[in-house]
Image (spheres, helix red, strand yellow):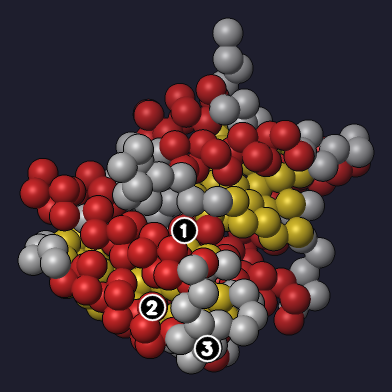
Amino acid sequence: MTEKPIVIKTPAEMILDSRAARARGERVGLVPTMGALHQGHISLLDYTRQHCDRLVVSIFVNPIQFNKKDDLEKYPRTWEQDTARCAEAGADVIYAPDAAVMYPAGFQTKVAVGAMAQGLCGAFRPGHFDGVTTVVLKLFNAVRPHLAVFGQKDYQQLKVIQRMCQDLDLEVEVVGCPTVREPDGLALSSRNVHLSPSERRQSLCLYKALSRARALAQAGEREAAALIAAARREIESSPLARLEYLEVVDAETLEPVSRLERPARMCLAAWLGDTRLIDNMGLD
Ligand code: PAF
């Protein structure tokens, strides 16, 4: 029988729990989530379970990283299912503070990473990464993890968080795990539930676009413009997909590159109807 994780609702209790784990010599691992857990999250839990003694999953739909009210409101909330999945994956603790506990009256501090958070998604979702880094630092302060694990699907988020940790001398190892995909290639996302059947079919153009660009790069194409043009054609052949951005960036700095000379990644965001999807792929 799987044992139920304990649910902790306040930073003060979370700090005590992790302090006790550390005092017992345990390695604490954190997987930050907003719930609506799918197989992509479970792969992060599995990785962390293998590398840590105490597995903490945070479930907190973070209001300050949503720049549209309706996006926050329609974000799926599946608490019963999430707790069952955490139990199956062997989580010890679910850290799930309420918004009023995370951001009590008078809260007025934010963490803002510079240029790296301004391009790609940052250009279209003003304030989004400030919201992410602020909540992730608060989660790190409460959980005090040795290891924190994020998905590479949110590649910019991963790099921005690694930058924050380096810049602020945080003593936490931040690891990115590979994107988990549906058998046909669509990246798993909590937002996929909003796709209609025809949008779901056409959403495949995102994976096809990235795969096409990677195949060309592997065949020797070095010009980012040529890779972007090929990927764009793939997306434009699906009338339901509306491209928001499509860029080739340096895999570490996220600066746009014009020629592939160092590890690079193609990153994109597109709308299928009212649903915004993001994806990315290494071009090496
Ligand atoms: O990727 C997410 O689910 C969120 O952005 C995170 C990292 C949990 C912060 O709210």
Q: Which residue is mark 2?
A: 227
Q: Is tag 3's residue or tag 1's residue first in the polypeptide sequence?
A: 1
Disc 2 marks which amino acid?
Leu
- Does the residue tagged 1 have its C-beta within 8 Å of any atom of ligand 1? no
Q: Image height check: is 53 above or below 191?
A: above
* Disc 2 from disc 3: Cα separation: 10 Å
Find residue 153 and name its label. 1
The answer, for residue 236, to whether it is visible in the render is yes
Counting residues from the start of the chain, the first of labels 2 and 3 encountered is 2
Find residue 25 and report its horizontal and vertical position in percent: 91, 38
Gap between marks 3 and 1 measured at Cα: 23 Å
Pointer 1: residues within 10 angstroms few (<14), some, or many (20+)? many
The quadrant where residue 17 appears:
top right
Residue drawn at the location 38% of the way across and 87% of the way down: 225
Distance from Cα at disc 2 to Cα at disc 1? 20 Å
Question: Where is residue 175 drawn, in percent x and y?
Answer: 67, 56
- Which residue is pictured at 36% across the width and 64% down the height? 212
Mark in front: 3 vs 1: 3
Verify CB contact (< 8 Å) between mark 2 and mark 3. no
Secondary structure of the residue carrying numbered label 1: helix
Q: Any atom of ligand 1 within 8 Å of the CB at mark 3? A: no
In this figure, which residue is indicated by the disc labeled 3? 259
Residue 193 in the image: x percent, y percent? Answer: 23, 44
Disc 2 vs disc 1: Cβ atoms closer than 8 Å?
no
Asked whether 130 or 48 is in front, the reply is 48
Callout 3, which amino acid?
Arg
Q: Position of residue 62 (x, y in %)?
A: 42, 61
Please, what secondary structure does the residue beneath circle 2 have?
helix
Q: Is residue 107 left or right of residue 210?
A: right
